[in-house]
Amino acid sequence: MSRRLRGVTLQAVRLHCLLQRIQAPVGCWQLSSTQEKHNALHAGPWKYIYYGFSTARTLGQSEKTSPDSCSVPKAKSQLPFSELLEDLRHSAAKHFGKSDIDASELESVVESILKLGFSQVQVRQLLALNPRIAVQPSQKSMPALCILNALGLNPSSIIKVLEKCPQLFGAKDHQLQPRIDNLRKHGLGEGSLQRVLVQCPQILNLSANQVNNTVRFFKDKCVFTAQQVTEILRTSPNVLFEKFEELEYKFQYAYFRMGIKQPEITKSGMFRVPLEELKQRHIFLERLGFYQTPDKKGQTQIINPKLKGILNISEDNFLAKVAMSSWEEFDIFKKLLSLEEMEKEELEDSEWEDDEESEEEYSSKEDEGLFQGNGDGSLSRKRSERSARDSSD
């Protein structure tokens, strides 16, 4: 009896150990539903083991599949090339109002675009941007795509570039490549060049001479170094499209009126900001006592905020963190400053008109002195000439 009891006890101990081994990882198993969890917890140990093995088997199967196949639904399969081509041909015919679209030429263009890594959706986007792709030879529409692709821009970035500057569709290889090489010559290397093109692709419409003239202007008139000019082109490519007079006036305002030197101007992104906004923020801080123009030695009685901290933030942050003022105060100030500028311009115009009138009056008196008496009894030149003619007769 004791031997049988001992055997039952050993069997119970083994069973208990087995249950402990099985139950330990069950807390990590994810049961498929709340109802299954409830059933597992209240159905006794064998049911619990059943649910645990059921879930473990499910997890084991999922390990054989990729994470993408579990978490992301399968994308719709692309159209066969023939169907895509027919669809594009139909769209082009509808756009141009004719049905005789050359299918062979369109096929060549679409194949070339797909080989560059564009998807079918992106091909449709390109044709929507420039429908002439479907009716013109590939050598007219492909140069821009090929060059931008060779620069390392992905299809999405290329589409953004062409959306901002559709004129590039008509650019030729012998036009684009020298312009890109010229930008590289001025320091826009890999990475910087791509960012600039996405930000301002219109620079590829500028000739090398136009870019070179702007670079020369910054070096000669503003005394920037070559490295500083490169930084300006990288952060503010819009300077290539602005008038030199406006750029020079903005530079002189920052340099002489605010007392800021070239290195700080370069880092501030000042040339991206309109001159009006620059003056508004600077003069507002000045009148609040938060900015002071340095003296001849470059010293001030207060610590001026950096130009980057004045300009390279939103208006809300400028008012809250730099000016420590309200929007209402700044709005009233801008209106008053605008009136001051208008009165100043009117005063300058009136002074200019007065100067012109005085010059005209002075010149008219000089003319009268040539043909009238001088007050001492002498005859005018006209009378003298007439008298000389009479005497000769």
Image: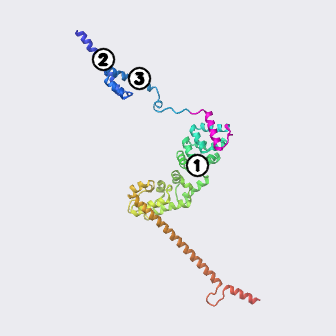
**Coordinates of residue 268 in the picture (x, y in percent):** 47, 54
Residue hosting label 3: 57
Q: Is residue 117 visible?
A: no
Q: Which mark is residue 165?
A: 1
Upstream in sequence: badge 2 or badge 1: 2
* 102 relative position to 268: left or right: right
Q: Are marks 3 and 2 in contact (CB under 8 Å)?
A: no
Q: Please, what is the three-letter code of the amino acid marked with disc 1? A: Cys
Q: On the image, which quarter does residue 333 sit in?
A: bottom left
Give the Cα separation between the discs numbered 2 and 1.
Answer: 76 Å
Q: Secondary structure at mark 3?
A: helix
Q: Secondary structure at mark 1?
A: loop
Q: Please, what is the three-letter code of the amino acid marked with disc 2? A: Leu
Q: On the image, which quarter does residue 121 sit in?
A: top right
Quadrant where the image shows the N terminus: top left
**Coordinates of residue 145 in the picture (x, y in percent):** 60, 42
Quadrant where the image shows the C terminus: bottom right
Residue hosting label 2: 15
* 63 relative position to 123: left or right: left
Magenta span: 78-103
**Coordinates of residue 146 in the picture (x, y in percent):** 61, 42
Q: Residue at x 53, y 70 (%)?
A: 349
Give the Cα separation between the discs numbered 3 and 1.
Answer: 57 Å
Q: Is residue 87 magenta?
A: yes
Q: Main secondary structure of the magenta part?
A: helix
Q: Which mark is residue 378?
A: none
Upstream in sequence: badge 3 or badge 2: 2
